[in-house]
Amino acid sequence: MNEIKRIATGYFVAYRDGVAVGCIASEHGDSAIAQHSSRMYEAHLHHLDKHVKHRGSLRVCKRWMDEMMDFLWGTRT
């Protein structure tokens, strides 16, 4: 089962079956305020010897993370 938990402002940890496998973090740190623009995030996912990453809005990074976990570990049970 996939789960993405907010740990702090601008920082999330991705879990697959209760094991931390990746993270999503704001590029500007947890205390930065995005003024006149949207905050950008970077998602990192680790599986065996693979490390993949993606950049975009929080919504896009969460969707990417969820889809990549299903792709790398197989579909949800």
Image: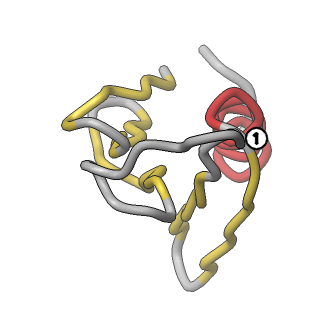
Count the labels in the image: 1
- Secondary structure at badge 1 equals helix
Residue type at numbered disc 1: Trp
Determine which quarter of the picture holds residue 76: top right
The residue that appears at 64% across and 52% down in the rendered structure is 40
The x, y position of residue 45, in whole percent, is 55, 61
Quarter-of-image position of residue 64: top right
Q: Is residue 36 above or below residue 72?
A: above
Q: Is residue 69 left or right of residue 48?
A: right
Q: Residue furthest bottom?
A: 49
Give the camera-side residue of 63 and 59: 59
Q: Position of residue 27 (x, y in %)?
A: 50, 64
Residue toward you, 12 or 52: 12
Residue 43 in percent (x, y) is at 58, 57
- Which residue appears at 68% of the width and 42% of the height? 61
Residue designated by label 1? 64
